[in-house]
Image (tube, rainbow, N blue to C red):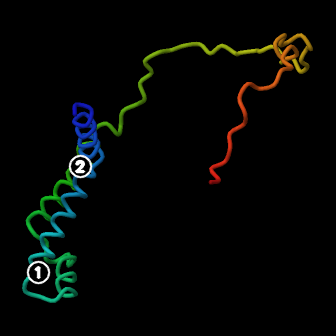
Amino acid sequence: MLRRLASLSLLFAWFCASGALLDVAQGVAWARMFAGYARTESVTAAARDTFDPGRPCALCRAVSQARDAAPRALAPNAGLEKVILICQETVEYVGTPARRTWSAAASPAAAGRVEDVPLPPPRGLVG
């Protein structure tokens, strides 16, 4: 239960940080507008009125204001230079060449095994 709560909390935090929460709010606004228009109009007219930019609802206006305010919140950090926290000299790695041949005595157990496998091979599921 705690793992699920932690996962849901992390997902919600990611939604808030990435701005996807505004997309969800916009979808809810469109669904509410469509349901309201569909009570009195045909489906095509309700869809046309829902996505008409000249007729936004209060939630659509709030989402639009939040999207307009979001880039301004990030703007003060745009002019900062990159800060180097650690200065470390690079060390060039020079490795030894790999040995290309295997000696016969590399595995003493490989040559000593000559008996049969103690288990029969698996049979197929043919019944």
For image coordinates 13% across by 72% down, the residue present is 56
For numbered disc 1, what is the local secondary structure? helix
**Residue plotted at (35% across, 37% down):** 79
* Quarter of the view holding residue 58: bottom left
Left or right, residue 41 beside residue 98 = left
Label 1: few (<14), some (14–19) or many (≥20) C-alpha neighbours in 10 Å: some
Seen in the picture, residue 28 relative to 7 is either above or below; the reply is below
Which label lies toward us, 1 or 2?
1
Dots 1, 2 in contact, CB < 8 A: no
Q: Position of residue 102 (x, y in %)?
A: 89, 18
Q: Quadrant of the N terminus?
A: top left
Q: Nearer the viewer, residue 39 or 113?
A: 113
Circle number at residue 37: 1
Q: Quadrant of the C terminus?
A: bottom right
Q: What residue is drawn where x is 89% and y is 10%?
A: 105
Task: Answer few, some or many: residues within 10 Å of disc 2's Cα (few below 14, many 20 plus, some between 14 and 19).
Answer: few
36 vs 97: above or below: below
Amino acid type, residue under disc 2 in the picture: Ala
Q: Which residue is mark 2?
A: 70
Viewer-side residue, 108 vs 18: 108
| Amino acid type, mark 1 | Tyr
Q: CA distance from mark 1 to mark 2?
A: 30 Å
Q: Secondary structure at mark 2?
A: helix
Q: Position of residue 70 (x, y in %)?
A: 23, 49
Residue found 20% across the figure and 62% down from its top: 26
Q: Quick one: label 1 or label 2, which is nearer the N terminus? A: 1
Placement of 62 over or under 12, stated as above or below: below
In the picture shown, does residue 34 fall above or below 65?
Answer: below
Q: Is residue 122 left or right of residue 73?
A: right
Q: Quadrant of residue 8?
A: top left
